[in-house]
Amino acid sequence: MRVFIVNSVAGNGKGRKVWPVLEKKLKEEGEPYEVNFTEYPGHATELASRASRREDVRVVVGVGGDGTVHEVAAGLVGTRVPLGYIPAGSGNDFARAQKIPSDPLAALDRIVRQEPSIVDTARINEERMVSTAGIGFDGSVARAVNRSPLKKWLKGFTYVLELVRLLFTYQPRNVTMILDNQIHTFQDVWLIAVANIPFYGGGMKICPQASNRDGILDLCVVRGISRWELLVVFPKVFRGTHVHHPAVSMMKGSHLEIRSDFPMVIHADGEIIGETPVRIEIQPESLHTV
Ligand SMILES: Nc1ncnc2c1ncn2[C@@H]1O[C@H](COP(=O)(O)OP(=O)(O)OP(=O)(O)O)[C@@H](O)[C@H]1O
């Protein structure tokens, strides 16, 4: 049995539109399937967790964006049931990293053909991180995007709009970070990105070397830079060449704790999960995927 979890609100309704296309194909194939539509934030985790406890379930397929991957994966981590994914969100960074086609039927076909593999996830406070987390500026941007009434009309451009707006208002913070038992202090920190895949925010290559198959987290710390300089450096993140700037430090580690002089907003896979302090720990090979 294949269980589909469809987020109808993902991608401004793309999730809802994609499902009939998938269902037509599934009916033609004649393989048994079930579908559940999410009714509220967090529902996908409950549905995935319930499905994973059933003997007859072969795969749980999330249909939506990175928030849907985040929620479905949280219900599957540590179980034998693999996560399948049909991208129908605004950013779809997990799909970009996993090389999942954007065409829903091609993505469905891939789930059938692909050999299952196993990837890393991370614990972040009491939550789960599948792809990336952002602390500070990008957490504040993610919160602003999620709350923005413009998201419906401007779609992916809302991210750039909120990012530019916050560039002029965000207050950098002083941070103490313990990374694998080493203490680092940073002044005027704009953001700390923690990554299992290279991309976030819809294709920005924040940690170009990150991989969810290497058992380690990649970090990008941006600090001690003026607003104007940051504005100049920002476009480089789309090619990943920001890593050469002196205000950018790239690090790697498996366990970190971050404390800041004022609270910094945290997102995991684009979902706001709270504010600093934060503790993040890699959990190698914790999620099966197809
Ligand atoms: N029925 C629902 N009503 C309201 N919100 C929901 C519902 N089902 C799921 N959600 C929430 O929808 C949010 C957005 O989902 P998702 O991230 O998959 O789409 P997206 O934001 O369009 O894509 P991306 O993250 O790739 O840009 C998630 O926070 C999820 O908790």
Image (cartoon, rainbow, N blue to C red):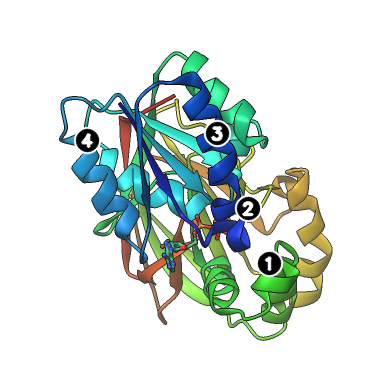
Nearest the viewer among 161 and 149 is 149
Q: Amino acid at mark 1?
A: Tyr
Q: Is residue 217 above or below residue 47?
A: above
Give the crowd class for mark 2: few <14, some 14-19, many >=20 residues within 10 Å. Answer: many
Q: CA distance from mark 3 to mark 1?
A: 34 Å
Q: Quadrant of the N terminus?
A: top left
Earlier sequence position, callout 3 versus callout 2: 3
Label placed on residue 24:
3
- The location of residue 120, given as percent across then percent down, is 38, 33
Is residue 76 in view from this perspective? yes
Tag 4 near tag 3, CB within 8 Å: no
Q: Amino acid at mark 2?
A: Gly
Earlier sequence position, callout 4 versus callout 3: 3
Q: Residue furthest bottom?
A: 169
- The location of residue 148, given as percent across then percent down, is 61, 79
Q: Amino acid at mark 3?
A: Lys
Earlier sequence position, callout 4 versus callout 1: 4
Residue that mark 2 sits on: 91
Quadrant for residue 158, please give it. Answer: bottom right
Tag 4 near tag 2, CB within 8 Å: no
Is residue 163 in view from this perspective? no
Quadrant for residue 33, please give it. Answer: top left
Q: Is residue 192 above or below residue 49?
A: below
Q: CA distance from mark 4 to mark 2?
A: 26 Å
Residue at screen point 27% across, 38% down = 77
Mark 2 Cβ and ligand 1 under 8 Å apart: yes
Residue that mark 4 sits on: 52
Q: CA distance from mark 3 to mark 2?
A: 25 Å
Earlier sequence position, callout 3 versus callout 1: 3
Dot in front, 4 or 1: 4
Nearest the viewer among 275 and 15 is 15
Residue that mark 1 sits on: 159
